[in-house]
Amino acid sequence: MTRDSQGIEKKLANQKLERRFTELDGLRGIAALAVVGSHYTGAHNSRYVSDPPPFYDFTYGAFGVQLFFLISGFVILMSATRAKRPTDFIISRVSRLYPAYWISLALAVLVIKTFNLPPHNPGFLEILANTTMVQRWLLIPNVEDVYWTLAIEMQFYVLILVLLLVTRCNIKDRLVVAGSSIWLAVSVAVSVWAGPSSRGINPQLVDTPVKIILNISLAEFGPLFCAGMLLYISRRNSILHPMAIVAGLVAAINAAVLHDLQSGGIVLGIFLVFLLVTMRKETKILNIAPLQWYGKISYSLYITHATLGYVVIHFVWPYVGRTGAMIVALVVASLVAWGVYKFGEVYLSGKLKALMQSAQRKWLVSK
């Protein structure tokens, strides 16, 4: 079989995989709602300490982030295999993420300044740094609580971009497996080294040198990206790659070493569910309309819900109770997210993508 025919077969397999795997949207919906639940329960009271506590503190919802990272590993490798040029990948990611992100940043600043949301009131330079999405790299505070995960995503995108440049947009499975193996080994070593300094400590309070090493290596979250990539290869090839299991186990072990055994168990459970879904032909429950809808707006919901929801809950709970206020906040956040999705992710993203593609064509002609 020639290289061209192999490339055509892989392209057809990618198209077939992408066309039928709507379960990813269902998983995105679950991940986004889980994070919203964690913020609207206990996390809200870290902002408004005098508000009544929720009937249940859904702290486990924060692990929706780990599910997002698994999905990203899967989807981003799939996207990279479709890129004809490294600039295609850059255009795809920038146009997809930034328009809605900038809208969410403007909304967060407006809400914080209008309602004097405690405890942090960002200054001009912090807000300016936040427009980059990678302020975490410089240890600059995030305007929105959830922005820290976006800088981690960007680190992963940079690694994929490097692979595209090195391989001239021909990323082989064996390279992904080899690169993942090295990343997993480094993450274990860093986790064992950093464990005594981070276990049981709020990540924001970990000593700066340790935090920097954890951030650069992505010791806690890198294995999740690896697992997602390896499960993409597994689903495309219709056979589970053993290294996917290794990556999932490493992700769980690192979570246990850096935090506690319970965290490790939860991460392992999330990985196993994701593995089951990716290796099944169909998981019907994930295709129900509400999950699909929340999956569609999951990015916009994720980046806009926190600050907006805190304020809504604070001002509404005296009239409808704490639980009622959370429901109102979810409705408001969902409607706002739908608007941001339609205007930011669909309209503005399309305009920005067309503009960047036009610049790309002119650059290619001038070469």
Image (cartoon, rainbow, N blue to C red):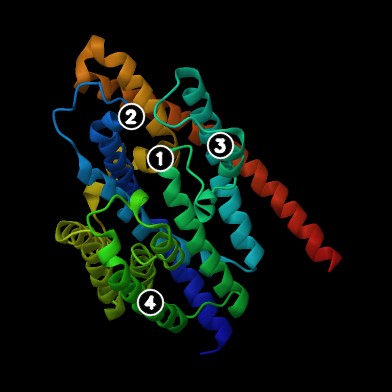
Q: Position of residue 43 (x, y in %)?
A: 28, 35
Amino acid identity at mark 4: Val
Q: Mark 2 = which residue?
A: 47
Q: Mark 4 = which residue?
A: 186
Work out whether residue 351 or residue 21 is closer to the camera in this orientation and state it. Answer: 351
Query: Pointer 1: residues within 10 angstroms few (<14), some, or many (20+)?
Result: some
Q: Look at 33% across and 29% down and name the residue there.
A: 47
Q: Look at 56% across and 31% down and name the residue there.
A: 106
Gap between marks 1 and 3, in whole Å? 20 Å
Q: Mark 3 = which residue?
A: 344
Amino acid identity at mark 2: Arg
Say if mark 2 contacts mark 3, CB within 8 Å: no
Q: State left or right for residue 5 relative to residue 144.
A: right
Say if mark 1 contacts mark 4, CB within 8 Å: no
Q: Is residue 140 above or below residue 174?
A: above
Q: Nearer the viewer, mark 1 or mark 2?
A: 2
Gap between marks 1 and 2, in whole Å? 11 Å
Amino acid identity at mark 3: Gly
Secondary structure category for the residue under label 1: helix
Q: Which mark is residue 165?
A: none
Q: Mark 1 = which residue?
A: 145
Q: Counting residues from the N terminus, which is met first, the one under dot 3 or under dot 4? A: 4
Q: Position of residue 96 (x, y in %)?
A: 55, 48
Gap between marks 3 and 4, in whole Å? 37 Å
Q: Counting residues from the N terminus, which is met first, the one under dot 1 or under dot 2? A: 2
